[in-house]
Image (tube, helix red, strand yellow):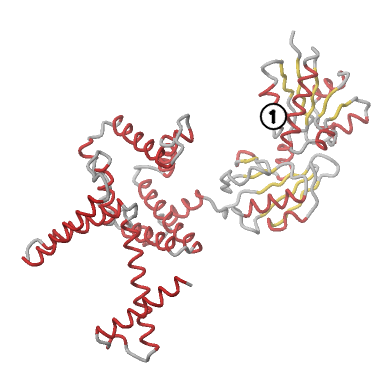
Amino acid sequence: MSSCLHVIGLGPAGLDQLTLGNYRRICSAKKIFVRTAQHPCVQELMAEGVLVDSFDEIYAKESSFEAVYEKITELLRRELQKGSEVIYAVPGHPLVAEKTVQLIGEKLAQEFEVVIHPAMSFVEEIFRVLKFDPIEGVLIRNYDALKDVGLTGQEWLIVPQVYNKLIASEVKLDLMTAYPEDAAVYVAQALGTPLEQVDKHPLYEMDHGTFDHLTTIVLPPNSEVISFSKLAKVMATLRSEQGCAWDLEQTHESLKPCLIEESYEVLDAIEKHDMYNLCEELGDLLLQVVFHTQLASEASEFELQDVLHGIIKKLIRRHPHVFGKEKAETAADVILTWDRIKKEEKASGNENDEVAFFKDPLGLPALMLASATQRRVAKVGFDWPDLDGPWGKVQEELQELRSALADGIGIREELGDLMFAVVNLSRFLKLDAEEVLRATIHKFQSRFLKMVELSQKDGLDFQKLPLDEMDVFWEKAKSQEKSSKLM
């Protein structure tokens, strides 16, 4: 018969909260192992003469909690290999915030019988002292798992075992990324013992007290927590009968100029390397996403969760080299994988290839649409073999425009052909035509403003200058620009 490991919960405090069944099992055992003797129940059991083997010394020897838990699990394995029953007692409930029990389930349960004997956890004591019903919503997170948890403030947040001031300070900083700095925080200590204490502080003062292994941090629901769901609620309020008259009048169509404008303001912040403004502009752009989603939700077309579900599934599906077993070592490999998966998606959806071939949004800026069109036809082999092709095409279209100007016929069409050819040339030069032109525009604007400044320094009214004198200042502005680049 295989050995059996009995994992016993000691409850959150002293013997008074230990279940009668667990008390009997402990008292009848010749020896029990405890994760730590630094617990009120263990101390009282030892005072009654119960023999206890503590793993506390492992904490002093190992460099991390993970190493401690691994070592404890291995020592329990050795005891079980002797062919006897083993008692292992842990604070609180064995299945609540008890990493060693998780490891036992992963590494020992396949070899040996493991029996869990439940007990009260520290959570029940939280409910008692703060007098709230868990049906209101409870989120329990370890102190090192707060950054990526997506805090919403819609539920009670419990952070157990905040056992020193350094960890308390880290918890405070993590919480302040979402909660307002004056949010109410309860610091609960030694619950269920004669030393029980609960103090209420504003979040910014949370780490000013003393902390030990029986300290738990609790935050009540808070409507001011910054989260994606908070943004969605604000948008829903603006669209409600009690909301904003302007927001209520908007439609998908009326918001199109806002979406375009906000997108270009993001681009402008990126080009200026203005991170402060970029942060603000990304928020404005995100608002457009939430606004359109709210409109769709009101029309019962789709919800915000549908938008999130779609993009998450797409990202995972199109990155099998990250989330699956495929390999893609370079950016070029990634693009090939992405294109292959897109083709598979179209095939499975029975999409008409002829209709879908040129499916880039017609609302794109013309340079971007031209570049996208050229890249798409190049993928099926309709492309020049080298740079000489697009360069020669630019020369050809330039000559045709000269002829059109001389004849006074077809000027508009030939100018368009020349511009399209220049975009193709930029693609072969591995330059983005949109970005190249925007950079040139910014350069022109800068030179023009400098030209005006120089003329004003000479006491001249720029707008009254003849063109040849304007050109003199233009050359001066260019010269100063070049000089500043060489410095």
Q: Position of residue 71 (x, y in %)?
A: 76, 29
Q: Nearer the viewer, residue 69 or 135?
A: 69
Task: Characterize the local packing of mark 1: few (<14), some (14-19) or many (20 or more) Cα atoms within 10 angstroms.
Answer: some
Q: Nearer the viewer, residue 127 or 296?
A: 296
Say whether residue 22 is left or right of residue 314: right
Name the residue beneath numbered marker 1.
Answer: 95
Q: Where is residue 415 in the image (x, y as percent from the top left)?
A: 17, 61
Q: Could you say which quadrant of the image residue 286 lies in?
A: bottom left
Q: Nearer the viewer, residue 209 or 472?
A: 472
Say whether residue 171 is left or right of residue 404: right
- Residue at point 69% right, 15% down? 111
> Farthest residue in the bottom direction?
459
Above or below, comparing residue 322 to residue 246 in the picture: above
Considering the image in quadrants, where does the N terminus appear?
top right
Q: Which of 130 and 12 is in front in this view?
A: 12
- Residue at point 48% right, 36% down? 322
- Residue at point 69% right, 58% down? 204
Mark 1 is on which residue type? Leu
SS class of the residue under badge 1?
A: loop
Q: Could you say which quadrant of the image residue 332 lies in?
A: top left
